Image: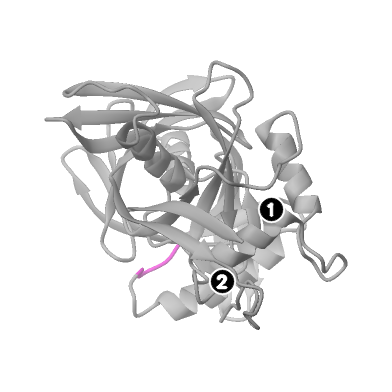
Amino acid sequence: MIIETVDYHTAGEPFRIVPAGLPPVAGDTVAERRAIALGAGGTPTNPRPSALDTVRQLLTREPRGHAGMYGGFLVPPDDSEAHLGVLFFHKDGYSTACGHGTIALGAWAVDSGLVAAPEDGRAHVRIDVPSGRVTAVVERRGGRTASVAFRNVPTRVLERGRKIVTASGAYEADLADSGAVYASVRVPEVSLATLPELTALGRELRAELLADHDLYGVIFFQELPDTPDGPAQRNVTVFADGQIDRSPCGSGTSARLALLADQGRLATGQVLRHESVIGSVFTGRVIGERDGAWLTEVTGTAHRTGEHRFLLGEQDELGTGFLL
């Protein structure tokens, strides 16, 4: 097996793009392809993964990847109005949404020439993802990609003040669906020192909430002093089975924007400064409302980190690798 990838990072979070050379992916839409991929994945009841899931494992496991790896398989869009479709993948499977990945894909689409862009100005890259159609607005300056704004599917507030009792105490969670469902929990400190504790707590909270919501991640946030443009927060998102987002989390930032707007803390025109656990920053704003949901835009930067040609030899006793 030979798989070629183009790798980016968005605010520190990896995104491994697989543009071609994939096994056939069944389905008429991106959402259908994800559902089929999930059903064909390697599980305790179905220990023989599909050819596609074998590639996912190869790219997200050591020694070719790691437990924090994220990426996207490029697939056809749902119709001719979009430039591309993508199946987002991580170590545990396939997600419905990925904001940092959308930012990386916007940069890649312009950098690779798939979507024409001006030397100075903006290009709009329309991408079909499992949760719907999103847009990456790529800002160009002097022939270079300067930033990418991710316009998400509408975000809905689902529940506020959900009380959860854990082994370490009681917490309150606010839930929003921004293409994936996130629970937001305020904590006194988000830092590298508190990361092990928050990771364990995130897994516990997610397990408690899964019964009522198809919860993807838990966003732990710390309030920071407001900026002249609006509120500021530091966060870390624990998603899937204990995976940590190194970036401020793109679709998670959409969830935070909707909750803040719903609270009356973020007015139209104001900007959320959203900092990650490693200090990287997204900015976000609410750009409108539709049918009781909030329309959001999250801006960040993505940088190419390499191009890879991964091999799986017949004699490799570790196969697609391992997770630690």
Out of 72 and 313, give the one closest to the viewer.
Answer: 313
Does 186 appear in magenta?
yes
The N terminus lies in quadrant: bottom right
Q: Amino acid type of disc 2? A: Arg
Which element is circle 2 on? loop
Mark identifier at residue 52: 1
Q: Main secondary structure of the magenta part?
A: loop
Out of 160 and 155, give the one closest to the viewer.
Answer: 155
Which of the 4 image quadrants contains residue 305? bottom left
Percent x, y for residue 139?
A: 24, 29
Does 111 appear in magenta?
no
The residue under the point 76% across, 34% down is 27
Q: Which residues are magenta?
A: 185-190
Percent x, y for residue 283?
A: 29, 42
Which of the 4 image quadrants contains residue 138? top left
* Vertical arrangement, residue 77 with respect to residue 280, above or below: above
The C terminus lies in quadrant: bottom right
Whether residue 8 is visible, yes or no, is yes
Q: Outermost residue toward the left? A: 142
The residue under the point 59% across, 19% down is 291
Which of the 4 image quadrants contains residue 116? top left
Q: Amino acid type of disc 1? A: Leu
Out of 307 and 149, give the one closest to the viewer.
Answer: 307
Mark identifier at residue 61: 2
Percent x, y for residue 240?
A: 61, 62
Compared across the picture, whether 15 is left or right of 50 comes to: left
